Image (tube, rainbow, N blue to C red):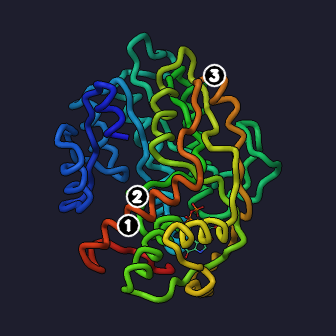
């Protein structure tokens, strides 16, 4: 996101929490021209101070506890960060802009983007999913995101704020955290290919996801804040694949047969599963002119190639976090 906004000529500020936050090093390597400011979604005062200091035109809230299995283990924290964190960012914008029920924002108001998720559809009521599809979240993460989604809509309706949500389906890249399936698989394939490991332990192979490339999705986020009228959009490819197909595609990209290496491990089965997600992104296509450029096979191959390159430096070149939770 930061990279895309810098390319568009934005001055970008990133909110950083904690005392020593390892990802900050990556951000600095990636883009020296992103400025950093301290703050935490659990700390209202710090968010108000950040908005006062930066005086932003746009605020993108991509911060969350976003790993679904962790949200059962730390359900309250997930609610605080992923749910109430949205309230605190919206309140910081509202307070700093002097907005109240009787005083609407004028021109030049701060525009707010909330990262909503296809996990809100959960046990899906219809396929494919649109902006009108009812929610039925299946994890504390999904429930917290539904809160953030409706709160964003509520601040738009209550205060006239330009506050919108992008209902993002799974989006991946070589920078994806190693706990998420596509990166866990691409890293696992690279390790097996390079002879560092022989097995990859996974959970449910029958679930389906609409997987896209994160670089395509951040374009949609920026476009959503550049419209005349604020509105929510479903962002996805419209094509769904099973976990097994993703695994097969990744192993094939490295000239391997997944059946020789993948072991099913109950530790990675979730208390409740989201079986099948598939986006209908027609509203984004018609109103934003948005379309994904990278397809499924290209995405998976890109991730496998990137991890083969990364691990050429040795088996521990990646920072891993693939516990079962
Ligand atoms: P999510 O859709 O936001 O939960 O993204 P993930 O990438 O974590 O999971 C995608 C799908 O892969 C889910 O249906 C998981 O149950 C399934 N899956 C199967 N094995 C694994 C595994 O070992 N790790 C993860 N993260 N997901 C797995």
Q: Earlier in the sequence, mark 3 or mark 1?
A: 3
Q: Where is residue 75 in the image (x, y as percent from the top left)?
A: 53, 67
Give the Cα distance between marks 2 and 3.
29 Å
Q: Which of marks 1 and 2 is nearer the N terminus?
A: 2
Q: Which residue does the numbered mark 2 point to in the structure image?
A: 174
Find residue 307 and name its label.
1
Q: Which residue does the numbered mark 3 point to in the structure image?
A: 287
Q: Which of marks 2 and 3 is in front?
A: 2
In the picture shown, does residue 156 fall above or below 137?
A: above
Q: Are marks 1 and 2 in contact (CB under 8 Å)?
A: yes
In the picture shown, does residue 17 fall above or below 247?
A: above
The reply to whether residue 177 is in sight is yes
Check disc 3 and report its element: helix, strand or loop. helix
In the picture shown, does residue 159 fall above or below 115?
A: above
Q: Within the displayed image, which quadrant is ligand 1 positioned in?
A: bottom right
Q: Which residue: 69% across, 71% down?
A: 272
Give the Cα distance between marks 1 and 2.
7 Å
Asked whether mark 1 and ligand 1 are closer than 8 Å, the reply comes as: no
Asked whether mark 2 and ligand 1 are closer than 8 Å, the reply comes as: no
Please state, as top left, top right, bottom left or bottom right, where the N terminus lies in the image: top left
């Amino acid at each position: 996101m930061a990279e895309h906004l810098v390319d568009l000529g934005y001055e970008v500020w990133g909110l950083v929490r904690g005392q020593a936050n390892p990802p900050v090093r990556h951000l600095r390597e990636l883009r020296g021209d992103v400025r950093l400011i301290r703050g935490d979604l659990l700390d209202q005062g710090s968010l108000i101070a950040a908005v006062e200091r930066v005086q932003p035109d746009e605020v993108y809230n991509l911060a969350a506890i976003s790993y679904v299995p962790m949200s059962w283990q730390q359900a309250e924290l997930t609610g605080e960060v992923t749910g109430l964190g949205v309230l605190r960012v919206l309140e910081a914008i509202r307070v700093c802009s002097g907005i109240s029920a009787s005083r609407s924002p004028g021109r030049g108001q701060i525009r707010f983007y909330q990262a909503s998720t296809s996990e809100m559809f959960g046990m899906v009521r219809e396929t494919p999913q649109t902006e009108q599809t009812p929610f039925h979240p299946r994890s504390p993460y999904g429930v917290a995101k539904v809160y953030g989604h409706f709160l964003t809509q509520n601040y738009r309706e209550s205060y006239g704020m330009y506050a919108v949500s992008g209902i993002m389906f799974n989006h991946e890249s070589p920078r994806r955290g190693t706990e998420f399936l596509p990166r866990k698989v691409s890293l696992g394939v690279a390790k097996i290919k390079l002879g560092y490991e022989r097995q990859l332990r996974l959970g449910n192979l029958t679930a389906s996801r609409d997987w896209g490339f994160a670089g395509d999705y951040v374009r949609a986020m920026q476009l959503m804040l550049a419209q005349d009228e604020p509105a929510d959009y479903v962002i996805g490819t419209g094509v769904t694949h099973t976990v097994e197909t993703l695994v097969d595609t990744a192993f094939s990209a490295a000239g391997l047969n997944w059946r020789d290496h993948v072991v099913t491990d109950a530790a990675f089965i979730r208390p409740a599963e989201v079986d099948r997600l598939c986006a209908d992104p027609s509203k984004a296509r018609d109103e934003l002119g948005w379309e994904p450029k990278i397809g499924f096979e290209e995405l998976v191959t890109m991730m496998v190639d990137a991890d083969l390159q990364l691990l050429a430096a040795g088996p521990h070149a990646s920072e891993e976090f693939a516990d079962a939770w």
